[in-house]
Amino acid sequence: MKPIYIQGVGVISRFALNFEDLLKIAADESFAINFDKKLSFAPNAPLSKIRRAPRYTRMAVSAAAQAKIDANLSDDQDKARVGTIFSSGFGSLESTLEFSDSLLPGKPDLVSPILFSYSVANACVGQICILNGFTGFSTLLTAGDPLEYSAMLLATDKADVIFCGATDEYNEELDTAIKSCGILQEKISDGAAVLILSTNAEKSYCRIKKFSSGSLAAYPYIHKTDTADSAEVLAEIFSVYEEPEVILTSCNGSYFDAIEKTVLKEKFRAARLIDAKKYFGETLGGGYMLNVTLGAAFIKLGRCKSLLAAGIDVHGNYLTAFLD
């Protein structure tokens, strides 16, 4: 597989609302976290074109606009060779619930078509493509690694550039439902991250050297997984890697932290472990991509030369990427 490089970054989180701030904060880890349940952020797109878009879509659009500027991507870029590969744990949940509520009175002819269009999970990807004129490969994943899929497209010459991202929004009903399981401790937060990927090493932040993932058979923040089985899956995932200097874990204060850290410390004895969710909060489907974003910042700043970023999707897949 061809080497894949990160050319630009966009981020919206309680930790930082853009990559420039993320770099400043990551430089000395001196920061104040925004604990607002729903973040306020600059839309980074003409309001006339996104005025009806929900927060979920606006987060993705805004992070993508940041990444495009950060990568200095030319408007002359062949739009048919630009891909948009995103992931999301729960999609546009606020719009979906609002749409469902509008159906309850039993008068579907009064339901807004616009509200329906924004209730689908890939609405954020569609809006990014419309705003930028992108016509290349485009999809939204609810499970699996969007980075690895993007790397496959680049390696097989299906695209020159890919906007690869993840976004999930805070929702009170979802927060209540997940917390009722009694496992998750970390605050659920908004989060969006977008990376611009290509095979061009020039002016890149870092290389994504390798990927490895595996299924835990259940989402560990809702169901307790078997300790021995989970440890075996993690050991197999980590077996493909040499030791990194830094590891950004998926830890969030749940029982699964002990399983993850035990296997990590057995395999990588000298690596520094950082629980990035103490910065970002639990962003559910967006946590893995936010970790990769922070990893890119660490390498750009020279805080480490190699880094392993980890995350768990809502289907219970444990995802990892090695950056250098």
Image (spheres, grey):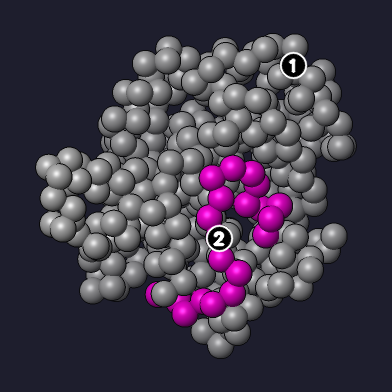
Amino acid beneath label 2: Thr
Start-end of magenta stretch: 131-150
Label located before the other in sequence (2 or 1) = 2
The alpha-carbon separation of the residues under discs 2 and 1 comes to: 32 Å
Q: Secondary structure at mark 1?
A: helix
Quarter occupied by residue 190:
top left
Position of residue 159 measured from the top left corner of the image (x, y, whole percent): 68, 73
Q: Residues within 10 Å of mark 1 (few under 14, many from 20)?
A: few
Q: Position of residue 226 (x, y in %)?
A: 67, 12
Where residue 244 appears, as percent x and y from the top left, is: 79, 37
Q: Which mark is residue 229?
A: 1
Q: Farthest residue to the bottom: give it.
A: 76
Label 2 sits on a secondary structure element that is strand
As displayed, is residue 182 above or below residue 303? Answer: above
Q: Is residue 51 left or right of residue 291?
A: left
Three-letter amino acid code at the position of disc 1: Asp
Residue at horizontal 60%, vertical 24%? Answer: 218
In this rendering, the count of numbered labels is 2
Return the residue nearer the eye: 247 or 228.
228
Identified at 56% across, 26% down, the residue is 219
To which residue does mark 2 refer? 139
